[in-house]
Image: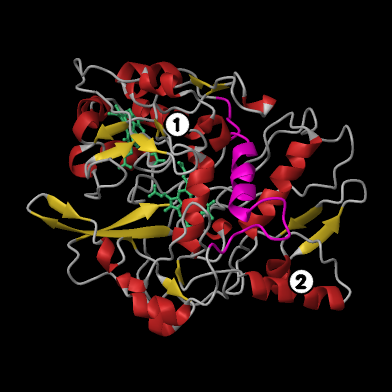
Amino acid sequence: MNTPRTLVILALACAGLDASAKFLPLAASTATTATTTTSTTTKTTVVVVPPVTPPVTPPVTPPVTPPVTPPPPRKVPAIRKYPPLHFGDNRIKPGVPALFGDPLPNLTIQQMNQFLDGRDGFVLPQTVIGGLGPIFNRSSCVECHSSGGIGGGSVINATRFALNLNGRVDSLEALGGSLLQERTIHPLAQEFVPRSANVVILRNSTPLFGLGLIEAIPDGNIISNRRNYGNDQIHGRVNIVTDVVSGKPMVGRFGWKAQHATLTAFSADAYLNEMGITNKHFRVENAPNGNLKLLESYDSTLDPEDQGIGRPMPEFEMVANFMRLLGAPPAQPAPAGGQSLFSLVGCAQCHTPALRTGSNSQVAALNYKDLWLYSDLLLHNMGTLGDGIFQAGATGSEIRTPPLWGARMSAPYLHDGRAATIDAAIRAHEGEGRIVRDRYLKLNAAQQKLLADFVLSL
Ligand code: HEC
Ligand code: HEC
């Protein structure tokens, strides 16, 4: 990647463009779609890319096909356009309600600029010259993370596959498993689900709002959520993973399998596995279905590809900072009686209403905060609801309790997005969730609706 990027910088410099811009190859390829405002006081480039525009309504045609069930309501991204920052103008104005995608309140100007710079990396599409591919899923993070605002979930799923032979599970790494990369920079490098795979599942894209706060929860506060079964047969297990950044064992908390403990690790992983961009933590490209010859033929960029040339740090770290500073989902007033019904039915045993952050973060806005996230961040054995994928120490039937905050923007639900509504998601609970699920089924319709409305207010 060194040579091509240097060439682009030179080319743009010759063309009289600002060669210090942080996302040169990207900016070059998206100049037509991005509105760029440059702050005079901070020299920060604020790139606001319009969200995926809602489809234009087609002209009315006479109905020929029988009506199909309408899809879940379209999630319309609402994005606040940030003006350039000036001293004293670094917080959300009092009285203006926070939106999904806003930064944490009370950031310093420097942190706010880190948020904006990282958001550029999150939004702007990667290019082949910058290391995209040879196989990848999408060319930017935002393509799968945009519902409700930049950093939300989406209806796009990732596919995982494996081979289960009488309970012995092979992730088929030699054949490019377990994550499928469904796109390629060259048709001959196309990856596909190997014929030998007999477990093929989808993974729902999750929202990233408030993840910096989740990262700031001390391990001990998650470990203490474990239960010793009891009447509702609820246990919960901590997933201790080796953090690729520090090399230390830590409590995993991100992803459906609690497979990562830090945002930097998740970002580095996503750069490689969603976009095919190697970095210092993930140095080896994915070969299409494990075929090294194909990899060699279509991968011409030097590894690691994301070295941060011309930037303050590698792009995956800037993007990790963006996620770290992304505010929690804004809650709405909860319907009366919702919280107590939620606890009474037993949901709160796994969907722990609040957890507290510690004091270790360098970002004051992350320290000693009560998060109303509604998750214990533990793995639970969900029985037949599990996806059969063994990953980062989590078994095929274990899934991490997803936080319920912001649920009104994150439909469809569950690890594979099978549930269009909160009601459908609750009904699908199995394994450790079965007894509470059965209690929910015995509620009357008004109580069930109250519970769903409560979840949608979080
Ligand atoms: C092809 C769609 C896709 C793209 C592109 C993508 N993601 Fe994701 N993202 C997902 C899915 C699916 C999950 C759930 C993964 C899992 O746990 O299996 C996820 C989960 C995450 C999580 C964990 C969230 C949580 O709740 O714990 C983070 C962090 C994340 N993505 C960051 C990124 C970043 C950063 C990028 C860009 C480098 C990116 N993603 C690109 C689909 C995508
Ligand atoms: C045993 C722990 C446990 C209990 C009890 C429990 N849940 Fe869950 N819940 C989970 C896990 C784990 C998942 C993820 C399952 C999956 O994706 O396959 C989940 C998923 C969900 C989801 C989907 C969230 C999303 O973002 O996809 C909703 C909504 C939900 N639960 C609500 C409830 C409600 C309401 C109750 C009480 C009636 C409840 N849960 C009881 C563990 C639990």
- Residue ID at (28%, 25%): 443
The relative height of residue 248 versus residue 227 in the rendered view (above or below) is: below
Q: Indicate if the residue with disc 1 has its beta carbon within 8 Å of ligand 2.
A: yes
450 with respect to 434 (left or right): right
**Mark number displayed over residue 455:** 1
* Residue at (68% x, 25% y) in the render: 364
> Alpha-carbon distance for marks 2 and 1?
49 Å
> Which of label 2 and label 1 is nearer to you?
2
The quarter holding residue 378 reads: top left
Viewer-nearest residue: 352 or 216: 216
Q: Position of residue 49 (x, y in %)?
A: 70, 60
Q: Which residue is tagged 2?
A: 9
Secondary structure at numbered mark 1: helix
Q: Give the range drawn in magenta.
A: 304-333
Q: Three-letter amino acid code at disc 1?
A: Val
For residue 340, which quarter of the picture? Answer: top left
Quick check: is 317 in the magenta stretch? yes
Predominant SS along the magenta part: loop
Q: Where does the image place residue 292, in percent across and percent down from the top left?
A: 35, 75
* Residue type at the position of mark 2: Ile
Q: Earlier in the sequence, mark 2 or mark 1?
A: 2
- In this view, the residue farthest toward the right is 40
**Residue 33 visible:** no
Q: Relative to 62, is 68 on the left or the right?
A: left
Q: Which residue is drawn at 64% across and 37% down?
A: 325
